[in-house]
Image (cartoon, rainbow, N blue to C red):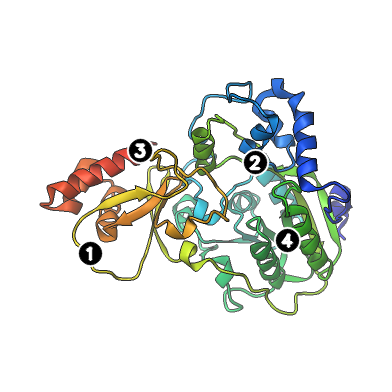
């Protein structure tokens, strides 16, 4: 193991089993401890071990959300990097806050050639360090943010092939979605591109993320051990709350919670690659193919459905998770059962079902080109006044022109 990794190594990584304490008991124990720290405000969420803020509030058994934990919502922080689009829930896009991204990039640059899989903030800082690096990400809206650099590959990581790149990287940095099947798949793909003796850097999700999180990490850890020595690095990584999660916090009455997610940075020295890629259960109905439009800082995604006969009308309705007709989802979970229903989704977690996909696509094509909302509605709707009014009402409900 390189000496600069040994310097930061906290401990050889170990399983996260909850031993004799069950998940519910552990959550209650954390809640009891944090009750004493309510005066610290939203900062206590970072000490929850991954418990979602609304679940932690429920454990406090308060009758009102009017507490020191509630601050004025700000609908997200806006892009941390000028010119960047907002994060989108389709991409499980929780980005490292700036200091964390800089630290990981500085560490990775010491290895040599670096591959960033779904870690654009690390790629950004590696480029500033003049490190030889490539970014693979499935969000094409990032292309403009990086001035269409040649070292970008916009592709779903699940569909990377041996023809895309060879195993010639000294370090690969991944931040997989925090779900067991996808996590294992990302590890297998990342390890495929590391030169033997090189390093895979990844995040370890917190043990109280959900009731099965500790057991899931035990499986991941056992798999990592088959690849080479595993080590936890310090300090922990910090995530910046994306706009779509902050919109849900606002909906739930939690207010502004800018930095609460934490994870552990783990290094694996790759001495042996996986025998074969691990298959992943792809939720094709929820993922599918999506058209994306950038309106200001927001990203609008419309699912490209099979060709259907349209009647020339336009309508939009929220999905079942929305509250009181609010378009914003009350969840950010990838396991939300209503995901297959969604065919329109924004980077501020407004989601629903569309009728009249071609009209919506035309409307957002005009908006992305810089046409004002009223004119875009007129151009998309033509002579149909009812459709024009529906598009205007739709745009108003989304605040789609808000910076």
Which quadrant of the figure contains the N terminus?
bottom right
Residue at the image point whose x is 48% and y is 34% from the top? 75
What separation in Å lies between label 4 and label 2 (alpha carbons)?
A: 37 Å
Quarter of image, res 200: bottom right
Q: Tell me residue 255's x, y (percent).
A: 55, 29
Callout 1 touching callout 3 (CB < 8 Å): no
**Foreground tag (3 vs 4):** 3
Q: Residues within 10 Å of mark 1 (few under 14, many from 20)?
A: few
What separation in Å lies between label 3 and label 4 (alpha carbons)?
A: 44 Å
Q: Which residue is mark 2?
A: 52
Determine whether the residue tagged by mark 3 lies in a helix, strand or loop.
Answer: loop
Q: Tell me residue 263's x, y (percent).
A: 72, 47
Which quadrant of the figure contains the C terminus?
top left
What separation in Å lies between label 2 and label 3 (alpha carbons)?
A: 27 Å
Identify the mark nearer the N-term, 4 or 2: 2
Q: Residue furthest left?
A: 383
Q: Tell me residue 128's x, y (percent).
A: 61, 49
Determine whether the residue tagged by mark 2 lies in a helix, strand or loop.
Answer: loop
Residue at the image point whose x is 69% and y is 50% from the top? 105
Residue 159's place in the image compared with 328, above or below, is below
What separation in Å lies between label 1 and label 4 (alpha carbons)?
A: 53 Å
Callout 2 touching callout 3 (CB < 8 Å): no
Residue 52's place in the image compared with 357, above or below, is above
What separation in Å lies between label 1 and label 3 (alpha carbons)?
A: 26 Å
**Nearer-the-camera pick, 177 or 124:** 177
Q: Which mark, residue 310?
A: 1
Identify the mark nearer the N-term, 3 or 4: 4
Identify the mark nearer the N-term, 2 or 3: 2
Q: Which residue is mark 3?
A: 399
Identify the mark nearer the N-term, 1 or 3: 1
Q: Which residue is mark 4?
A: 112
Identify the mark nearer the N-term, 1 or 2: 2
């Amino acid at each position: 193991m390189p000496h600069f990794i040994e310097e930061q190594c906290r401990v050889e990584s170990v399983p996260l089993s909850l031993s004799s304490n069950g998940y519910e008991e552990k959550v209650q124990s954390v809640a009891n401890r944090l009750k004493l720290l309510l005066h610290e405000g939203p900062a206590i969420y970072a000490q929850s071990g991954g418990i979602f803020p609304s679940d932690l509030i429920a454990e406090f058994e308060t009758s009102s959300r009017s507490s020191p934990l509630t601050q004025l919502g700000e609908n997200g922080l806006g892009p941390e990097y000028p010119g960047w689009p907002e994060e989108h829930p389709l991409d499980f896009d929780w980005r490292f806050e700036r200091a964390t991204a800089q630290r990981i990039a500085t560490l990775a640059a010491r290895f040599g050639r670096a591959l960033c899989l779904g870690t654009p903030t690390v790629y950004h800082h590696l480029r500033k360090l003049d490190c030889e690096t490539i970014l693979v990400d499935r969000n094409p809206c990032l292309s403009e943010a990086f001035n269409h650099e040649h070292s970008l590959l916009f592709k779903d990581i699940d569909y990377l092939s041996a023809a895309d790149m060879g195993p010639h990287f000294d370090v690969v940095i991944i931040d997989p979605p925090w779900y067991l099947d996808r996590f294992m798949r990302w590890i297998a793909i990342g390890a495929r591109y590391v030169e033997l003796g090189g390093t895979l850097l990844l995040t370890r999700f917190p043990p109280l993320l959900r009731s099965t999180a500790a057991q899931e990490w035990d499986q991941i850890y056992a798999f990592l051990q088959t690849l080479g020595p595993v080590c936890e690095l310090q300090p922990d990584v910090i995530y910046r709350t994306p706009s779509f999660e902050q919109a849900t916090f606002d909906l739930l009455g939690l207010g502004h919670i800018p930095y609460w997610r934490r994870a552990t940075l783990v290094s694996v020295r790759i001495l042996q690659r996986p025998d074969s890629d691990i298959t992943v259960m792809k939720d094709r109905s929820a993922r599918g193919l999506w058209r994306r439009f950038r309106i200001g800082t927001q990203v609008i995604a419309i699912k490209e459905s099979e060709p259907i006969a349209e009647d020339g009308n336009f309508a939009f309705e929220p999905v079942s998770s929305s509250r009181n007709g609010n378009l914003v989802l009350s969840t950010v979970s990838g396991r939300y059962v209503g995901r297959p229903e969604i065919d329109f989704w924004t980077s501020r977690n407004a989601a629903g079902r569309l009728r009249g996909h071609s009209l919506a696509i035309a409307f957002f094509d005009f908006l992305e080109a810089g046409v004002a909302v009223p004119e875009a509605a007129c151009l998309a709707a033509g002579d149909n006044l009812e459709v024009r009014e529906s598009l205007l009402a739709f745009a108003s409900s989304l605040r789609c022109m808000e910076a």
